[in-house]
Each structure stands twice: as structure tokens, then as C-alpha cells.
Image (spheres, helix red, strand yellow):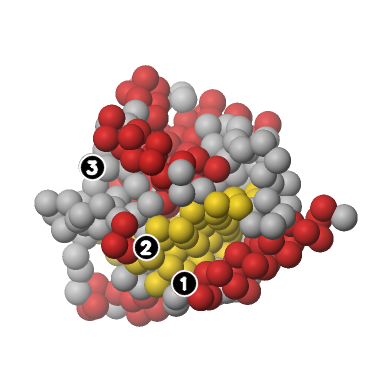
Amino acid sequence: MFKEALRLIKKYDRIIIHRHSHPDGDALGSQMGLYALIKDNFPRKQVYMVGDVATRLPFVDVKFDEIDDSAYSGALAVILDCGSSRLICDDRYRLAEKTLRFDHHIFCEKIADVDVVDSSYESACGLVAMFAKKCKLKLSLASATSLYMGMVTDSGRFAFDSTSARTFELAAFLLSQPIDLGTLYYNLNSKEFSELMRDADNMHKIQFTAHNVAYIYTAREELPEPTEEGVHVTSSGLIGLMRDIKGVFVWVNFTEGEDGVHCELRSNRYNINPIAVKYGGGGHKKASGCVVPDRQTAMRLLDDLDGLAATEEK
């Protein structure tokens, strides 16, 4: 599957890289990592990164390209870390002459002309790293650092059960470059004191369903004010607050946004992916997400999760 991907990258002189909206570390890491990988190995190619502003990882210094529709004429569009076409940021990828996807989510629809999809990988970054390794592409520090960041974040610091021996083999491959692990982990783990205080306040917002599904619901009026750049901060970081509660095997974070209620579904035991798919999303067996139109729909999704927990209890 990598040979066809490499053939397309070699063929097209203009390549535009997409990923899912509201990017996490894996979406950003795979986008930045593939960008550097292509530029390092094919310096004459025009390569662009498009997408919305990244708010989850403010330390990542990246500016996305603003390009005209005409740039897609005769171009290759690459889609990263996205299992559903609804979640792709900037749907102009459809205007490209050819499309290619690298993804590690459960396959639910064909999106690109060439789909490189393997849900056994812990991250899209891991899949791109394997692409680089198998195709014997030159790996720079910039590419390795971005891909390693995505592997770390999507594997839960190598703690989730998606982590495998291959994960560590690819991590070792990326660490052939002198990645500054101290700085990377500091940036990933450190928080402003005000954020820690806000987390403490949000712990009091955790509620439980009849069958012990934990959840936090954040209405728009509860969100912090936009930053000076006009970026609206979401409550996405709250999902981790519920991960280690004893006796909780399913948890979900709801955040109201301009486009609906963002739902982050997690479990350390059950397959919650079909519920995310039911509501127009997707992801993995134990980590999925979707966007629903309103609070009432979000509560129906919560009822479905509670029903799943009840069934699994028996």
C-alpha cells in the first residue's frame, strides 16, 4: 500500500495536506511530519498545509497556508488522521486531481482515490513513520519530532492498549534523530496554574449516569473568553479528568461550539465506536468522537452509552 502512496507523491508537483478539524497531536504531527518528509526528499515540490487553527497544543508553532481554489487544479490532496469525510477540515480536497489518505481509524467509508488505512496502528503518525521507513525516505529532525509527538499523544504516552511492539520500534526509528524529549514532554505536560485551578473546578462538574458513565457538559457560556487572536478555547482537555476514576469504564466530554456539541467518547473496556458512528462520527473502538446539533441529541448519545454500560455489566 505504501508503494502506490509513494508513486502519487513522486508524480505530483503540487501537494496539499489536509487533516481533521479541531486537530489533536496526531493530526498536527502527521500533517507537519509528512510536510517535512516530502520537502526533505522532494525539495522542488510545492507543498501546502491547510486547516483550522490548532488550540489544543498552543506551543506548536505552525501557520497554515491560505490558498485559492485554483491551487487544487492538477494537484494531489493528502488527507491525514481522518476516518469520516464530515470531519475533514477544508472540503476543497475534492477539487484535487487525485486524493490520498493515511489513517488509523476504523474504516467506515472510502474517502480518497488511494486509501492507506490500518487501524492496528496507534496513530496516524505511526503509519506515516512506517511509510518513511519502508520507502527508505530521508528523515529530518523536524519530521521525526512532529511524528513522535503524534505517536506519544495518541497512544496516551504509550499507555493505551493500542500500543504494541511495533509502536516502540517506530519510536526508536524516529529517535535516530536527536529529538529534544525534555522540551517536548515539558510542552505536552505542563499547564498554567490557572489551567490547573480550572481543572480542579471542572472536577466538580463530573456527573454519573445510572450505570456509572462519567460525563462533563460545558455550555458555550461556560467557556473561557476567546484569546487575543480570536481563538475560542474548548473544554477538550477535560476528557482526561475522568480517565482514572475507579469503577468508571466509559466516559464522555460534551462541549458546545459554534457548529454544535462536540462529543468525545472514551472507554478502557468497551467498544464505543458504533455509538459515535450512529451520531455521524467515528474513531477507534475505545476512543471516538462526533459533533451533534444540540444538547438534546447529546443526551440521547449519553443514554446510548449508559445502555452499553448496562449491557456489559450483565
Q: Is residue 21 left or right of residue 273?
A: left
Q: Quadrant of residue 310?
A: bottom right
Q: Are marks 1 and 2 in contact (CB under 8 Å)?
A: yes
**Residue beneath disc 1:** 295
Question: Which of 53 and 238 lies nearest the eye of the viewer?
Answer: 238
Find residue 193 and report its horizontal and vertical position in percent: 28, 30
- What's the amino acid at mark 3? Asp
**Residue beneath disc 2:** 219
- What's the amino acid at mark 1? Arg
Measured Cα–Cα span from mark 1 to mark 2: 9 Å
Which mark identifies residue 181?
A: none
- What's the amino acid at mark 2? Ala
Report the residue at 54% width, 37% height from top: 156
Q: Quadrant of the N terminus?
A: bottom right
Residue 79: tell me if it is visible: no
Measured Cα–Cα span from mark 3 to mark 1: 34 Å
